[in-house]
Amino acid sequence: MAVNVPTLRFLASRALWATRLSSLFTMQTACGYKLRFYPTAVSATMWCNPQFYAKDEQLLGEQLGTGDTFVDVGANIGTLTLAASRLVGPSGRVFAIEAHPRTVRYLRGNVRLNSASNVTVLHAAVGDHVGTVKFSNRRSDDQNSIASSGIEVPLATLDSMIIGLLPPASRIRLLKIDVEGFELFALRGADRVLERTDAVYFESWENHFQRFGYSTKDLLTLLRAHGFDCGVDDDHRSDNCENLLASRKSA
């Protein structure tokens, strides 16, 4: 039986990942940035399907322009960080935040690979206070999250990390958050950041939220209290994993 090309590429990606020979390869994406094929789930996914993040990249293209500021919470190896870097240009700024120490090394490597001088990489999990926290260490690294056991990583608030790095009165055009269910706590530590943010793009999934004792409604209520239109009904529940965009209401 003939094996089709996508299947062969998938098998090759897993073999390269397992042997760690993958890091010898780089990928050129449709958005124009490059990724090194580090031994990670996201790298393997991009190797198999370079269009995997096309919808997210399209949204960034609609939201970001030259000179804008983008904050990427849960940046992983930098796919959206690097797409945003190209969109905002040398006069713009990108802050890429990643918790896992191994993944943040790969993120920094991809930033160097692209000579993305407008990107600032920050290493921390994001929550509602400053301290330390346990973080999972799964092979499927795109699913790592704050957990009851695992490796210890620094915990910080968005306000403590970002506000001091912004010029006075400057705006954050887009804040993206994908932290595997910890979104509510990340936003609770971001009062000052949210005051200066025009739009929030976030992963929403009831299953993830319930692991941390809250619901989709709690997250939407917080964003609405900060002046955002979430684009869904007040009683919306994310029964499937989805990405939502909350935009600041017009005055």
Image: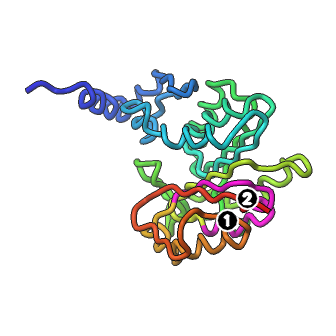
Q: Which mark is residue 95?
A: none
Hey, what amino acid is under mark 2? Leu
171 relative to 25, above or below: below
Quick one: quadrant of the C terminus? bottom right
Which residue: 76% across, 49% down? 172
Instruction: Return the mark for residue 187.
Output: 1
Question: Does residue 77 appear in the picture of this structure?
Answer: no
Q: Is residue 120 left or right of residue 183?
A: right
Q: Quadrant of residue 10?
A: top left
Q: Residue furthest front?
A: 251
The region drawn magenta spans 184-203
Which mark is nearer the camera, 1 or 2?
1
Q: Residue at x 65, y 64 (%)?
A: 229
Queried whether the magenta region covers residue 169, the answer comes back as no
Name the secondary structure under disc 1.
Answer: helix
Q: Total number of numbered labels?
A: 2
Q: Find numbered disc 2 in the image and state the secondary structure of the residue it sits on.
A: helix
- Three-letter amino acid code at disc 1? Leu
Count neighbours of disc 1 (C-alpha within 10 A) and say few if under 14, some if 14 to 19, many if 20 or more: many
Residue 166 spot, x, y in % from top left: 85, 48
Please give left or right for residue 86 compared with residue 171 in the image: left
Q: Is residue 75 visible?
A: yes
- Identify the residue at horizontal 75%, vertical 33% (top origin): 66
The numbered mark, 1 or 2, whose residue comes first in the sequence reads 2
Q: Which mark is residue 158?
A: 2
Compared across the picture, whether 164 is left or right of 198 comes to right
Circle 2 crowding by C-alpha within 10 Å: few under 14, some 14–19, many from 20: many
Return the x and y of residue 241 as percentages of the image width and height: 43, 59
